[in-house]
Amino acid sequence: MIFVFISNKLISCDSVLPFCLSIKQRFPHQQFVFYTTDDRTFSFIKEQPVLDGTIDELGVLRRFGGRHQDFPSFVRVSIGILQLLSVMALVLLKDAKLIHFGLLSQGRLSILARLFPDKTYHFNNNCWPYDENWLAVASIGRRELDGKSDYDHNLREINYVSFDENWAPFKMARDLGQTAYLIGAVRGNKEWFNFLSNKFGELLEAEKRRCNMRPQERAICVILGYFGKFQRIRSEGTVRELLIQTLRVISEEYPNTKILLKPHIVTQQAILNEVLKDAGSENVHVTSLHASLLARICDVAICNSYSTAMADIWAAGVTTIEFTDYCDEALEITNGNSACPSKIDYFINNDLDQFREAVRHGISLGYKRQRSMPELYTADYERLIACFG
């Protein structure tokens, strides 16, 4: 039995599932229980057919303590205590393992990491390596990050697992001689892509039919995010206006091409509905398909502020465009480029003509780009999987 405690950042679920599939393929007897402590995360996962379907293949998704809508608070506390005792018993008696992304490092659930440090594995929550200036851009408007202070309390843990070398807890654990596994970008491996093809091929075809796409028709996808003001974006309303411009340009240049919008968990539905109403195009469709599946039917992927979903699409060879409007401080940090330039083919900052040209060029390529994928660190990867046998 393996318990996976998903953080409130959905990317933790996305990042760990390919690794869990590798465990399942090598040790078919293993069962997984995925726990989330957040109602919104639980509901959003259930609404995502690839994430929910993959979890069903591995085991079960549960809301730790039960959902607010199902039980009053005192009942949820009781459920949580029973679940916690059950996890403890299975770790003690059945050698169950614990995977988490920081949830067991603090708060009430930290008792699990304290009692069973050798059975607990603390993962980085993003499997795609961050570019050098990502954290600097993300810290705009916050206190200075020294890369260490946020994690001092975690050093009591034994096992750290990172997808790249730059995760601060991984570097500290390695420097202190603790167990630190470096396994690479697992969402870019062939096992994951083959699983998606075999498991969700019919789902992809059904989505194409829903969007009135012909069998060989290609689309343009737009990866959505948060519509409000955040670190690197110039002002409130910027992303909303950029999306309106994005839809307008695509509709003008390619009036018969389907546009597939992929919302994020933080995308405000009310604002999206307003934009769709203004767009008024029958070619615009909202989809819940995983980005890795969208890549199979799209020639170009666009975002108005970088999202890690773009990395999945980039890995599949699709042309990626970030059409955005960074604030001056972010542009200075990035030297006028994307916060993650390694996954973006065209970065356009508030220049509609350049954006139009980038879309034209991306469509004109008409083939999948060859990508140089981040390295998989095979020795650590296999050594880590063996721990869950």
Image (cartoon, helix red, strand yellow):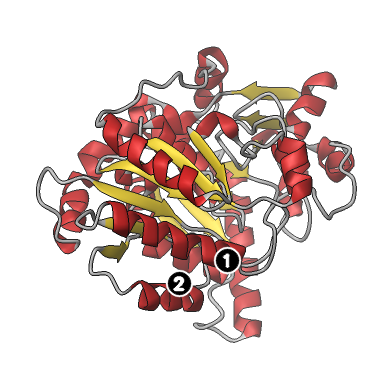
Classify 226 as above or below 203. below
Classify 377 as above or below 82. above
Residue beneath the point at 64% across and 38% down = 124
The mark nearer the N terminus, 2 or 1, is 1
Q: Residues within 10 Å of mark 1 (few under 14, many from 20)?
A: many
- Identity, as a three-letter code, of the amino acid under mark 1: Phe
Which picture quadrant has residue 295?
top left
Give the labeled residue for mark 2: 272
Question: Can the viewer see residue 360?
Answer: yes
Residue 267 is situated, as x and y percent measured from the top left of the image, at 52, 66
The answer to which of 351 and 307 lies nearer the viewer is 351
Residue 90 is situated, as x and y percent measured from the top left of the image, at 56, 48
Q: How many marks?
A: 2
Which picture quadrant has residue 320?
top left
In the picture, measured across the screen, residue 16 lies left or right of residue 329, that is: left
The answer to which of 262 and 356 lies nearer the viewer is 356
In the picture, measured across the screen, residue 42 lies left or right of residue 249, that is: right
Give the labeled residue for mark 1: 227
Q: Secondary structure at mark 2?
A: helix
Residue beneath the point at 45% across and 61% down = 245
Residue 43 is situated, as x and y percent measured from the top left of the image, at 46, 68
Mark 2–mark 1 CB contact (< 8 Å) = yes
| Structural distance between the alpha carbons of marks 2 and 1 | 9 Å
Q: Secondary structure at mark 1?
A: loop
